[in-house]
Image (cartoon, coloured by chain):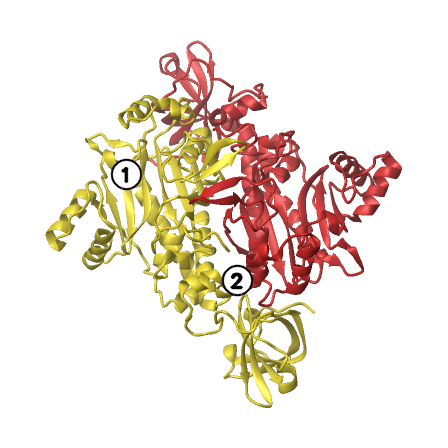
Chain colours: A red, B yellow
Amino acid sequence: MQRTYVCDIEKKAEVNILVKGWVHKIHDLGQISFVHLRDKTGIVQLILDKETSKDLKLEMAIEVCGKTVLNEKAPGGIEVLPDDIKVVGKTFYETLPIEVNAYKQKASLEKQLDNRCLSLKAPKTRAIFKVQEEIANAFRNFLTAQRFSEVRTPKIISSSTEGGSEMFTVDYFGRRAFLTQSPQFYKQMMVGAGFERVFEIGFAYRAELHNTWRHLNEYVSLDVEMGFIEDENELMDLEEALINHIYDHLRKTCARELEIFKVELPEKVEIPRMPLPEAQEILLDKFNLRSPVGNISAEGEVVLSDYIKKTYGSDFVFLTHYPVSKRPMYAMPDPENPELTKSFDLIFKGLEITTGGQRINDYEMLKENIKKFKLNPDDFAFYLDNFKYGMPPHGGFAIGLERITLKILNLDNIREATLITRDMKRLEP
Amino acid sequence: MQRTYVCDIEKKAEVNILVKGWVHKIHDLGQISFVHLRDKTGIVQLILDKETSKDLKLEMAIEVCGKTVLNEKAPGGIEVLPDDIKVVGKTFYETLPIEVNAYKQKASLEKQLDNRCLSLKAPKTRAIFKVQEEIANAFRNFLTAQRFSEVRTPKIISSSTEGGSEMFTVDYFGRRAFLTQSPQFYKQMMVGAGFERVFEIGFAYRAELHNTWRHLNEYVSLDVEMGFIEDENELMDLEEALINHIYDHLRKTCARELEIFKVELPEKVEIPRMPLPEAQEILLDKFNLRSPVGNISAEGEVVLSDYIKKTYGSDFVFLTHYPVSKRPMYAMPDPENPELTKSFDLIFKGLEITTGGQRINDYEMLKENIKKFKLNPDDFAFYLDNFKYGMPPHGGFAIGLERITLKILNLDNIREATLITRDMKRLEP
């Protein structure tokens, strides 16, 4: 018999079906038991006699042939009276280290991460990764429709490509290599190599000595790079439209999951754009909060976001006009004010989720800028090569996938939005 | 004015348009020049006077406002008479290190890889990556429609997860860690953790000391894992249907690219399944070719593929029933013949592109098998944990993305199907 997924069970009695899944809950009522079977798509109730249910344990994998029975009180209004139950995945435990079927997860986050194969089974945790998958799909669909190409660029790089600090080192056949912090150079290369518009959904690595609620050492970066642009505003327009598309897509594909997290996504997102100096001034004048040179602090991001929400009704704000000294050497200076760059950050509910901007596309200018940054152009030979053969004006941005998931679902810790966490302490599972 | 992509130019005269792209070719005819502008989507001809064309160099990035002119002799039957040409990406070279517009690329593959930002511009090279992108899209769409979830699992792993040989080492905050050879353990974990059916499109790393036409040290693995299966035949059914879907999808999305490579994809793929011993026997009896124990040689793969093509008309063949001794410790033994496993390889035009099979899903059996392989179960504690909480029967397979691209397009070297190559000698660009 063909398997029926729980979400596809018709509300119709006396239908013979085969369902497969895990024993989610056992309600022992004496002569009979209600057993909840959980599959990937939902939960359905089985009615079992004492004899059958006594051999079942929570989280056993089972296959059940049976007949449907209408019952308004059962989840989904339907239950299954089994003819046959086959245990296809046994259990080997005394007590479950963490509960899968609790309304609220009582185990600490650390314990959930230690027992990831169990904690991921909990419907609420599962919902996070359904939403995350659809964020990535929305990102891809939106960009593909606008002639962006998906690329996959190397994660092992030679020493000379990026800054060098905070990078993991790899032994590459005896050579010292690194795990990439971002596909920045490669996505620019692809723009110049005729792809024009590219995106990448891939891992990025930061060997940062942070262990906070918002830092990961291995994370998924949603990267965008676009050629033949006018200026950085075109990039912010694109990202604003992208955020709107992600919200639309989530409303369509993740209604159930958003409900679990009691999240209502606004119909239309309009994102204010504010020069960094103005943001710093607001923080100082209105909140007596001093900002570091050329940036705002993590605390400032939270306070500013609150202010923006109250003033403009937006969960997002673009900060623009970051100074040259605080951006990478490839950031395009503002011709009207060469101390500032055509770059931006996107702050979402108090957390930076994006850095972006227009890049320098002229070979000579880039070479000069590398020198101004007290770096050696020879170390960037492979990168500079890309600028010799007609590099159009271009720019891009990157969104941290775990960070945007965290903020959309109002989670507390980025590890909750990470399937398998890699942080300073965690290399397993 | 809104930009028009070359492929969207209507075959209609006197239309004002803005096109953007690179100077692909310059035909100097004395008083006038024909200049080919290449964008991401195609090539269009510009008609220029002497004065204007003299400042143009091959591969400059330009933006052109002009009027369309009908001309049957021009590519696409239409050309553009420019009012204004703006150079937005200058060039900095004496002579191009490799030709972009040649009908046949004359530069060696090594030189193409050294000058990747240029070699990728050539339309024929570009076509490879369009096809590759669509193979990955077809893989995703096919599986998503069958309720598979896309996952992204860590690429930095602790020492204890896999074999340990042929792995790149990473310094992880002073701990010795590794780059993963495959997401095998994690995809199995996700099946058990309630995702049931998962796929991953991600990098895998092999520190193999090979430098051949078919080996890469960083490659993209299309991984599949599926729970609640009957046996390994269900996996082969799935892969066969997947291959058919990929072909259908490529016919729809890459007609132009397939034509460039003179590739005609068969309407229907039916893949013979042959036990390994039978294949070995054929090689010995018919071709006097001796096979290594429990496998066939690279030469044998080529000879067998030829034989299969002649005998069954198929470019593909599944080899089944590999012996326990030649498969990993998690391969499910065949209950009817415990020296053999329920695993398979897929050979495509003489090249192995897939290894797959049913896995052991019983905790005790897996632990025993680890011991039989003279390994220590304690080293696999995190992996074994997944089998304590109801692991259903499951299995999967993986396809090398570059390998399937190579074979579909009949390329000679896997590096041609790799955007940026990482091999023993190549860590740049």
Provide residue B263's location: percent of width, then percent of height.
Answer: 35, 65
**Could you tell whether B241 is left or right of A126 in the image?**
left
Look at the numbered discs 2 and 1 and tell me whether their residues touch, using CB distance below 8 Å.
no
Local packing at callout 1 (Cα closer than 10 Å; few below 14, some 14-19, many 20+) is many
The N terminus of chain A sits in image quarter = top left
**Could you tell whether A339 is left or right of B238 in the image?**
right
Does residue A10 appear anywhere in the picture?
no
Q: Secondary structure at mark 2?
A: helix
Q: Nearer the viewer, residue A109 or B421?
A: B421
Which amino acid does the dot numbered 2 rest on?
Cys
Q: Name which residue lies at 70% across and 49% down.
A: A327
Which amino acid does the dot numbered 1 rest on?
Ser
B190 vs B350: above or below:
above
B119 vs A149: above or below:
below
Which image quadrant for residue B11?
A: bottom right
Q: Which residue is mark 1?
A: B343
Q: Nearer the viewer, residue A318 or B161?
A: B161
User: Which numbered disc covers residue B117?
Assistant: 2
Provide residue A337's location: percent of width, then percent of height.
Answer: 80, 57
Q: Secondary structure at mark 1?
A: strand
